[in-house]
Amino acid sequence: MSRNHNIDPKRLPRHVAIIMDGNGRWARARGLDRSEGHVEGVNTVRKITEAASEIGIKYLTLYTFSTENWNRPQEEVDALMNLIVIAIERETADLIKNNVRLTMIGDFGRMPDFARRRLSKCMDDTAQCTGLTLVLALSYSSRWEITEAVRNIAAKVQAGSLDPDDITDDTISRNLSTADMPDPDLLIRTGGDMRVSNFLLWQIAYSEIYVTSTYWPDFTKDDFLDALEQFQSRERRFGLTSDQVQQQ
């Protein structure tokens, strides 16, 4: 049964990032193969993407496959790659219908050619959409991303196009995969673990964090709205005192 929520549309987070955890544990609790948990997790992606689009979120970033996930059993990795590609291809028409633009961040050089090629087509097909931007973090880790940013900045210094004294926080942000989007206002983690798992480490410096023990396949639109409601109940101080924030 749907719950009542009191969401202020004027105080929505612009960018919500989600660590979608618990697919394997959801399957194991039901005596199923881990792959069944990933399949059910794809259904949750659809529901939460639709909810985010409907309510007016501008950016939704989903931690879909980390660079550490490449170390999983090859059979599971292959199944995940195929599942991701097939699911995105299947959903592309609905993404276009709902004005959702698809993009990706990550180390695409490690991805199989078929996955990179077919997902690139899905991104191209949705490129003209102007509503929600759905960001898939695929073959992604924040340490990889920051290392790449440092390499890019170092190359500019070496080439003489950037003075080391001119390097600022903004310089680093502009060299990250997320340079064209705002930092996440809200980070949601399902599955109950209290860690950020190498996800958007630079970008979540001032994100509000919401952790639920609910496994990702069981995470509903109501759960998503609960997270938004709690986000709106918090005072975001960004290093200031409560009195200073209230005076602004």
Image: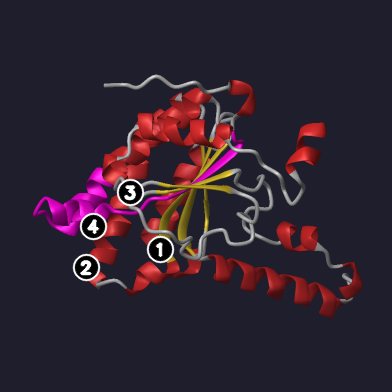
Q: Which residue is mark 3?
A: 213
**Whole-percent x and y of residue 137?**
48, 55
Q: Badges 3 and 4: C-beta atoms under 8 Å apart?
A: no
What's under tag 4, amino acid-wise? Gly
Task: Give the SS element for disc 2.
Answer: helix
Along the viewing direction, whichever of 212 and 124 lies nearer the viewer: 212
What's under tag 3, amino acid-wise? Ser
On the image, which quarter does residue 233 sit in? Answer: top right
Task: Give the SS element for disc 1.
Answer: helix
Q: Which residue is mark 1?
A: 113
Task: Confirm whether the magenta stretch covers residue 32.
Answer: yes
CA separation, marks 1 and 4? 26 Å
Residue 106 visible within the image:
yes
In magenta, the rendered stretch is: 13-41
What's under tag 1, amino acid-wise? Asp
Task: Give the SS element for disc 4.
Answer: helix
Q: How crowded is the residue under tag 1: few (<14 C-alpha within 10 Å), some, or many (20+)?
A: few
- 1 or 4: mark nearer the eye: 4
Q: Which residue is mark 4?
A: 24
Q: Badges 3 and 2: C-beta atoms under 8 Å apart?
A: no
Task: Give the SS element for disc 3.
Answer: loop
Task: Confirm whether the magenta stretch covers residue 169.
Answer: no
- 2 or 4: mark nearer the eye: 4
Q: Which residue is mark 2?
A: 75
When the figure is inspected, residue 109 is found, relative to residue 211, above or below; the finding is below
- N-term-proximal mark, 1 vs 2: 2
